[in-house]
Image: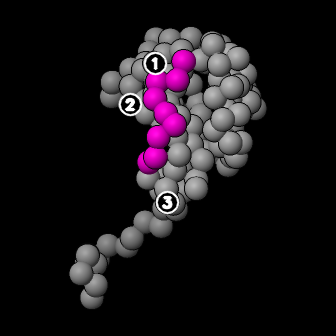
């Protein structure tokens, strides 16, 4: 048996390998959709009749408000409490220029970080609800 391996008799392991979506609690869904679509060029999709989200690669970001959370919801949905990293294909110099053209302040960066698959170079910005958004390139 490996050092960190353990076996639970009578239990089967859950084979989770990806994230499908996350949900951000925001104050204004239309404003958030506009920001993520225009600033990050993420396509808007409509699902379940009238709900809207943005696609990020194979995943999506859903939006909800404190006043109208989609059930079931987190115990304490709060705007501005998320911190997430988006991987970009464009170089960060071009991204910085693009962000400035939309008057998006860079909180920090470029800085070196470690991501799920190796070393990153990252810029940090805030969305309209003050969620911290890291925009990164793998080196």
Where is mark 1, residue-wise?
Answer: 130
Spot occupied by residue 15 in the image (x, y as percentages of width and height):
47, 67
Q: Nearer the viewer, mark 1 or mark 3?
A: 3
N-terminal of the pair, mark 1 or mark 3, is: 3
Residue in view at x 70 percent, y 46 percent = 89
Q: Residue furthest bottom?
A: 1
Whether residue 20 is visible here, answered yes or no, is: no
Spot occupied by residue 66 in the image (x, y as percentages of width and height):
44, 15
Residue in view at x 51 percent, y 37 percent = 110
Task: Tell me the quarter of the picture where residue 13 sits.
Answer: bottom left
Q: Left or right? Give the position of 12 relative to 15.
A: left
Where is mark 3, residue-wise?
Answer: 118
Q: Which residues are magenta?
A: 105-113
Q: Nearer the viewer, mark 2 or mark 1?
A: 1
If the image is split into quadrants, where does the C terminus sit?
A: bottom right
**Magenta-colored segment: predominant secondary structure:** strand
Q: Is residue 6 magenta?
A: no
């Amino acid at each position: 048996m490996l050092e960190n391996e353990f076996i639970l008799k009578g239990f089967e392991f859950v084979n989770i390998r990806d994230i499908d979506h996350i949900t951000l609690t925001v104050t204004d869904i239309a404003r958030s959709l506009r920001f993520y679509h225009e600033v990050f060029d993420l396509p808007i999709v409509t699902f379940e009749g009238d709900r809207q989200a943005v696609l990020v690669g194979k995943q999506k970001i859903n939006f909800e408000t404190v006043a109208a959370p989609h059930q079931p919801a987190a115990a304490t949905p709060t705007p501005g409490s998320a911190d997430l990293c988006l991987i970009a294909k464009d170089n960060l110099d071009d991204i910085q220029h693009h962000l400035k053209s939309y008057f998006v302040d860079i909180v920090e960066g470029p800085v070196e970080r470690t991501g799920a698959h190796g070393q990153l170079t990252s810029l940090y910005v805030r969305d309209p609800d003050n969620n911290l958004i890291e925009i990164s390139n793998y080196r």
